[in-house]
Amino acid sequence: MRKLHKSLQAGVLVAAGALTLGQGLAKADEIVIGASLPLSGPLAGFGSFQQWGYKHAVEEVNKAGGIAIDGKKEMVKLIIRDDQTNPNLTASNTQTLLSRDHVVAMLGSCTPALVNAGALVAERAKKPIVTGCDPLQVFTSVRKWKYAWDIFFSVPDLTVAPFKMLASAGVTTNKKLAIWHDNGPDGQANGKKLWPAFAKKFGYAVVQDAEFPINNAQFTSIISEAKAKGADVVLVDAVTPPAVAIRKQMASEGYSPKVLDIEKGAEPVQFAQALGKLADGVLVGGYWDPTFPYPGAAKLAKDFEAETKLTSSQHIADSYAAAQVLLDAIAAAGSTNADKINAAIAKTNKTYVVGPIKFAADHTSTLPIVSEQWQGGKTVIVWPKKAATGKLLFPMP
Amino acid sequence: MPDFGTVASAIISGLLLGGMMGLIALGLSIVLGVMRLVNLAHGVFLVMGAYAGLYFLKYTGIDPLLALPLLALGIAALALPLYRYLLAPLAHRGPEAQLMTMFAVAIILQNLFVFTFSADTRSIERSYATLPLSLGTVTVPLIYVIGFAIAVALILAIHGLIAHTGFGRDLRASAADPAAAATLGVNVQRVQMLTFALGTACAGVGGILIGVAFQFSPSSGGAYLLNSLAIVVLGGLGNVLGTLAGGMILGLLQSLGGLTLGDGYRDIVGMALFLLVLVFRPEGFLAARRA
Amino acid sequence: MKQHRLIGDVGILAGGFALLWFAPSFASDYALQISFRVMIYLTLAESWNLLTGSVGLVSLGTASFVGLGSYVAFGLANHFGTPLPVILMICALAGALLATVVSPALFRLRGVYFTVGTLALAALLQLLMVNLPTFGGASGIFLKHDPPPLPSLYHYALSVALVTALAMAICARTRISVIIRAVRDDEDAAAQMGVRPYRVKLGAFALASALIAMAGAVQAINLGAIEPYGTFGLQWTIDTLSMVIIGGIGWRLGPLAGVLFVVALGEMLANYPEAHIAITGVILIVLIRFAPSGIVGLLTRLFTRPRRLSSP
């Protein structure tokens, strides 16, 4: 019995010691904000871009002398934790950031599962969280938010883009449409409801509507069915690994439709790098490009590429903008009080690197969608005409 | 109802792909049989093979499939110190110690891959990897045929090695009863080390095939690990040709499952089949004997 | 002697529980959150320790029951508005039920095959949840109402951990421990002694699964949103396994020591997000290699003579 006592005591002491070690790192005159990001696991690709976007915004503010709180300039400290692409960890990271590091506000993770997990914790703790990377309709379907704000694209905008693009390009197809989508929240919304509805509106016949799990690797059955049915247009909603698998397997099964649009998965540059020539002609919706006529757009991509020697991604822009919105709100509030910051976020009305940001009553701000096409390892905007940086490659090579 | 061409293509593709999966599973199977170790790093070794193939192509310009023996030896050589310094000292302890060590190795390697190669999805780009092979209405990917041929050749070679050589005899003895084998003068540790290297090489070669035929990223090993476990159980532990058969059966059933229920049900078909076999045919496995 | 020890254990547990119950009135939110995490993991680790350390069933199926508890809890809360204590009881029943249903299949497997079978079970359940739209598919389910505040959640986690600790005390301090040890050491010999190994194994499996399902339910309520990849994820299984191994398999205090160590380590390394998984891996390898019976085993060997869970 004594031994049990002793060990218990030792255990409690060790734990208490360990926990105090981690505490009290923040200095008194700092504004501390936090973010939990997928720096490892399947979504590590997104996480690294977001991390850069968040850090870059904070560095710029600090270089300019920080933010005045109650009239006194303070530096901003950003604490980033890795959630390993696991929503359980996003939640516990957010809890720790709020309760141990006493962050005044949070920046979001990426993809609905992770963003929502963190936002739910922040919402309960009544601390503001600004995020991108969570399609607006998915974000608003969770609950009525009071402290969470989302800057991203609207799902119907993204979904209708390929139809509008094809209509405005004036190209002819047999109007037979195959839809392949994953069973994630946005995949189901696009594939089951929105695409079939728009297909009807734009006069397409849906000859196939196939669903697969998010991490699927084999698409032979789906592809051969579409091939047998002779679909000229294929719309896909998938993350990058299956997107690469789909494009390769289409080629190796000898199926080449005239139009192939892969939402989500075809967006990062790794898609084109993994596929080489096969990426040519693949369409994808995007919400940002360095050529956009917004302040700092070209410079942001240049800074990123100079600093990291990597090709830039649109994810540096929404994360950078989200961080700027938060930092501007803290400055406008002139306070680290959560409710004052939250009220200031609600009043955001300014043009950022991603375009004008102004939150609607449901806490969302919509980014406009463009249609992009991979051509020679680079994306070219092919729709709408006023933003276009190149011509549509049709049919797909 | 899908037409004949679609069904036949699916069946043949399934069988061919299953052959490749059989090779990957064989690596897991021999390690499990000889060392009683569910190697949780098997999937990560596969990814390691794929990166090795990718960078080999990048720096030498030589097709990794032509240099398979060299790459396989290289990957096997990496496994030796892992065995010597991490696994061997734990040999006398329960299965959990080695299992957890390999899990730790898996997360370290995966972290290392993200750090060195980024989390991006990669693919070993070869022109033949995306060519179709058509016969009438039946179309299968050419790379499936190539991969299948390589996998079957390797599986047969390993079968020969285990069935007809002195090393094979020692291996079988060690698998059946390590203690008894040791008293008969078999250097069980050496056998285990070579088996572990061979198993790792199987994963690595499988990874190169996967890299050429499909795509991979630091985290894509997990799915192949589970798939391999299913094949091992289907084919019977320690049965080399059974593993090939198990792979092909699983590939076929997954293809048929994909065709009738949708591609999403492929993996479910695999797992359900796996559990069914576990339940109804346990006497075929090592389970009959007490460990 | 045994009874005496049991009463002693229960006394300590009751005292500790009473003390910890009042933690919300003096501890910070951070301390409460960490304690919540410790309680959840402690439940998982104790259950796994019972299965593996005592009965000898090496399970990789922890995630199956965490996920089951999560989904059952959300179903009850969202559709019937069931109060949380009732939800926990039903989750425990569901966990025991699933364990009983799959046990005829799993218990035919011995040794490493049982391990593989439990791993496959978790994978199958995850795939099913991903593919079945009835349960929200890959997008998962949200809790309709806000979860209870942190102190209340903490009390639930603490209660679940107490139930677990009491169950473990009973298993270790009564005649049950003798039976369990007999089954672990030699099933056939135990059967000849009149013990029914199947029933003992089933009892332990059902108990562990019930406890894990309750922990899963509390964790899910805490999250407010669940989806198959997180709740049925291998991470739960691996975390549990590594905690017990680090603490010391089969030792009474092994799970507690392992949980405290891993949670504290996680908090300390959290400031190095790029490397913290790799560092955890290295620590795991070193501990497994040089502290074969975990932290508790190491300390015990240094200071006292060994004492194992099932020793008389």
Image (tube, grey):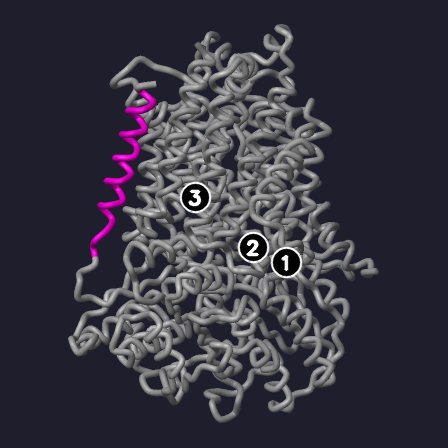
The residue closer to the viewer here, B49 or A63, is: A63
Mark 2 crowd level (few <14, some 14–19, many ≥20, 10 Å Cα): many
Marks 3 and 2, Cα distance to the nearest angstrom? 40 Å
Residues at discs 2 and 1 both on one chain: yes
| Residues at marks 2 and 1 touching, judged by CB atoms closer than 8 Å | yes
- Quadrant hosting residue C102: top right
Residue A192 seen by the camera: yes
Q: Which mark is residue C136?
A: 1
Mark 3 crowd level (few <14, some 14–19, many ≥20, 10 Å Cα): many
Position in image of residue C167 (x %, y %)? 51, 27
Mark 1 crowd level (few <14, some 14–19, many ≥20, 10 Å Cα): some
Q: Which mark is residue B71?
A: 3
> Is C296 contained in the magenta span?
no
Looking at the rendering, the stretch of residues picked out in magenta corresponds to A3-25
| 2 or 1: tag closer to the N-terminus | 1
Marks 2 and 1, Cα distance to the nearest angstrom? 8 Å
Q: Which mark is residue C227?
A: 2
Residue drawn where x is 70% and y is 75% of the image: A196
Task: Specify whether B217 is left or right of A214.
Answer: left
Residue drawn where x is 62% and y is 50% of the image: C82
Position in image of residue C257 (x %, y %)? 35, 31
